[in-house]
Amino acid sequence: DHTTTDTLRTPIVAVLGHVDHGKTSLLDKIRGSAVSEGEAGAITQHIGATDIPLDTISGMAGELIDPTDFDLPGLLFIDTPGHHSFSTLRARGGALADIAVLVVDVNDGFQPQTEEAIDILRRTGTPFVVAANKVDTTPGWNSQDGQPIQRSLEAQSERAESRLNENLYEIIGQLSDAGFSADLYWRVQDFQKNIGVVPLSAVTGEGVPDLLTVLMGLSQRFMKEEMAIDVFGAGEGTVLEVKDERGFGATIDTVVYDGVVHNGDQIVVGGQEEPIVTEIRALLQPRPLEEIRTEKKFEKVGEVGAAAGVKIAAPDLDRAMAGAPVRVVRDRPVEDVIEEVKAELAEIEVDTAEDGVVVKADTLGSLEAMANALREAEVPILRAEVGDIAPRDIAVAETANQDEHKAILGFNVDLLANAETELENADVKLFTDEVIYQLIEDYETYVEEKQR
Ligand code: GTP
Ligand code: MG
């Protein structure tokens, strides 16, 4: 038996925003700059995440950071693909991410997925900063690669600077419309009350030192207590994605946010019907500094401690759900852990009605977000489930009483091939989209037209 040892874990930083606004480029830049700082060995690439230690961050932030001000180990960045709702990133009733970076293209401003992200940030109370990205595309811009943003602004013509300012104030106005008081980060005194906006470029790297500085400051000041974990505790995590992996079958890409997970551990994972009880066959990490999206070869590791991203291979994971909890059993009855997982899943169970539409979503978190949005739109739900659209969903939708409810709303899901003819022959309307608002708007328009 171990004695309890509290230590500070790495804060989890989610990078989110509209498609193409530059989330992945920003992370690539942070990784790339870290490599050119000569700290390549220090960065560890995780499944779905990148861990950047404090030393490396302070190297990149240069004059802006004094590393002795900090005692958190670094930052663990999670990239979220634009079409994939940030709502997957949930943990124990709240947000998995401790803080977030909302990436907004300075030229485009707020877009549907920006709004969606901001809704979830508000609902989960997640502190965030705004990365006003692509400043280098401002007409007449004179790029200052990798420099703090003030240095870069000093090098701009008045014309370029005022063009940029117009765009920045547009974003600050949009944040205010969304109910957040915001300002350029160097004018923010209290980051708990005001959202800091950091102008930057993911391509030239100017302003990136500022972003890292603000993130370290935010996590150090407001999150230190929440970062204290028992390093020997039974691991807890969240499923990011369920993926088939050659030679391993179904695996779960997991972010571990508490305790430690060992190879061979018995785990309980939220499944589509029942919690799945299984034993870990392998813990897989990408090889150092390999780009994860192209990574095919993994390294087997013996254990993974929070916070980290890891691929877990174990039997019976094919029914696991993205967004569901993962718990290591260790030293306690498995029934207790099953109950824990059930209780957590019950929290996000959607209220269904006698009559209503069928809802399908890619993850538990997005199902929850869909249910919230539908409640606000006063659209009742007959059944809500995670997964692609199957023949039985069409059968269920057909049983709706009102014609307008004979509909399936699918968020980020596909129509299974064996359900295609079923749909053709059924009196059921299918709506799919990758933006929740759009999906609901399309359905509402359909209902209005039907009622005419
Ligand atoms: P999804 O993952 O599809 O949601 O997109 P993303 O937000 O990860 O965007 P990504 O990083 O893939 O960037 C989209 C495009 O914008 C790419 O062509 C990038 O090169 C470009 N881009 C991103 N950041 C910048 C920037 O700061 N300046 C310029 N000029 N181009 C950028
Ligand atoms: Mg991306």
Image: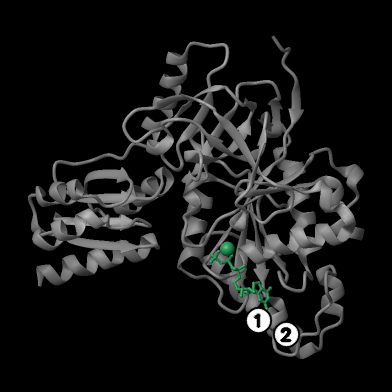
Toward which corner of the image does residue 7 lie, by quadrant? top right
Q: Residue 15: tell me if it is visible.
A: no
Q: Mark 2 points at which residue?
A: 162
In x, y percent, where is residue 99? 64, 48
Q: Mark 1 points at which residue?
A: 166
Q: Which residue is drawn at 56% across and 65% down?
A: 176
Q: Which of 375 and 14 is in front in this view?
A: 14
Q: Nearer the viewer, residue 364 or 119?
A: 364
In x, y percent, where is residue 246? 50, 45
Mark 2: which amino acid? Ser
Q: Is residue 90 left or right of residue 409?
A: right
Q: How crowded is mark 1: few (under 14 residues within 10 Å), some or many (20 or more)?
A: few
Q: Do the residues labelled 2 and 1 touch (CB within 8 Å)?
A: yes
Is 145 drawn above or below residue 269 in the view shown?
A: below
Q: Residue 299: tell me if it is visible.
A: yes
Q: Residue at x 72, y 39 (%)?
A: 10
Mark 1: which amino acid? Glu
Q: Which residue is drawn at 37% across and 37% down?
A: 319
Quadrant in which the C terminus appears:
bottom left
Q: Residues within 10 Å of mark 2 (few under 14, many from 20)?
A: few
Is 103 drawn above or below residue 325 in the view shown?
A: below
Quadrant in which the N terminus appears:
top right
In x, y percent, where is residue 66? 91, 50
- Badge 1 marks a residue whose secondary structure is helix
The answer to whether the beta carbon of the residue marked 1 is less than 8 Å from any atom of ligand 1 is no
Alpha carbon separation for disc pair 2 and 1: 6 Å
Mark number, residue 258:
none
Is 230 drawn above or below residue 201 in the view shown?
A: above
Q: How is the image coloured?
A: one colour
- Badge 2 marks a residue whose secondary structure is helix
Q: In which quarter of the image is ligand 1?
A: bottom right
Is 232 drawn above or below residue 134 in the view shown?
A: above
